[in-house]
Amino acid sequence: MLRTGTADLPLHGGKAPRWLFQRMVSLADAITEVVVVEKGEDEVLRLLADPLRFQAFSCVLGFDWHSSGTTTVVMGAMREALADNENVAIAGGKGRQSLNALKEITGIADRMDLSPSPLVYASRLTAKVDNALVQDSYSLYHHTIAVTSSGHWAVVQQGLSHSRSWARRYHWIDGPGLDFVVEPHAGMFGSPQPEVLDMTHREVGDARNASVDLVNDAIHEHRSDYIVRRRGQSLLDDYTDGSDHIVLPAGINWNGVRAAYDRGVENYEELIAVRGVGPSTVRALALISELVHGTPLSWSDPLKFTFAVGGKDGVPYPVDRKAMDETTDFIREGIERAKVGDRDRLRALERLRKYLPPELASTA
């Protein structure tokens, strides 16, 4: 059954209380370990990549504020909880910490004896797609990538609206069917927007191909035909009867277009991987390809998994510190017993699940 609805993620200032955050770290550590013991390390990635499970996870950890902080605080707690974990690690974070992701990935790869190149590429390209290919008026300010010792990964990142009032969360997961530029998301969380240029839509493959062709046809040498002048719009008289107008975004990086031309990019993924090919350039190539070649674009929001969930500021009730600590201890004791062959306590957790209401059991 498709679960849809709406979700607003307002921007909230301040920080999670220290007493809560430290308990979140401890409980996140215990839950992660039991997931690894029971279902393997890659199940942690599936947990983070599913918007429904992620939101439920944040509530289990005691962070039930329905806001942008759900993403940043939960991933911050997971990052700290997994700092010394041999199976799963997290790089990146909020603001400036997100800029350290590539360096941290290299450290994680060394520790887990992995090649850092595929992980660095995934980190860079997921950020590029959500900033440049999905033009939904949200700019990324939080980027985290979870890596397992098997070399698989999941990405959770969040964007800030231009009004600086709302946030949108993007979920990714590595897998054999992943195409970075064709409907790649595991899910999104946020409020739908009325008009979004979505260059990842499955039906705009012709526009993606045309963008590559324009670059390889040395469009940068004819940029004066396309640049919008301050006093009005440019007419593409060379390609139309004069009745069509086009407004291109300011700040097109023609050096980036030239770099792509010099490289001889063969497909759209290679094109957007070029440094300097950002939102304005992607949009310009898309608009020109539509006008010149008639390739249709998608202006519908790719948001697929949106839903209303959770309370805020102690609603429906404040965090029970004692219960949270006891739950953490229960799980940890179960993990230690499981390591020596006694899995009764972990089986007890599974047996408790059948007593949940059906609507909760489906996401537990």
Image (tube, rainbow, N blue to C red):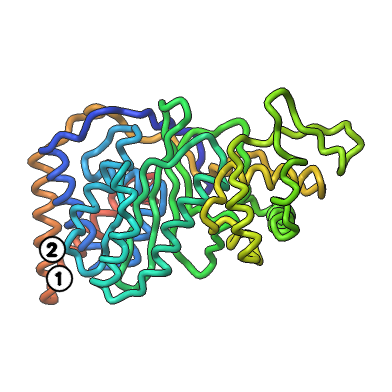
Which residue is found at the position 75% from the left and 29% from the top?
233
Identified by mark 1, the residue type is Ala
Query: Does residue 122 lie above or below 128 as drawn?
Result: below
Query: Does residue 25 lie above or below 216 as drawn?
Result: above
Q: Which of 347 and 117 is in front in this view?
A: 117
Which residue is found at the position 39% from the left and 65% from the top?
119
Residue 344 at what x, y percent from top left? 15, 67
Query: Does residue 335 lie above or below 74 as drawn?
Result: below
Q: Name the residue tied to disc 1.
A: 338
Labelled pair 1, 2 in contact (Cβ < 8 Å): yes
Residue 94 at what x, y percent from top left? 31, 43
User: Tag 1, which secondary structure?
Assistant: helix
Q: How far apart are marks 1 and 2 (CA)?
A: 6 Å
Residue 48 in view in this figure: yes
Which residue is found at the position 70% from the left and 37% from the top?
227
Q: Is residue 212 left or right of residue 328?
A: right
Q: Name the residue tied to disc 2.
A: 334
Where residue 111 sits, quadrant-wise, is bottom left
Where residue 319 sits, quadrant-wise, is top left
Residue 39 in view in this figure: no
Q: Nearer the viewer, residue 215 or 172?
A: 215
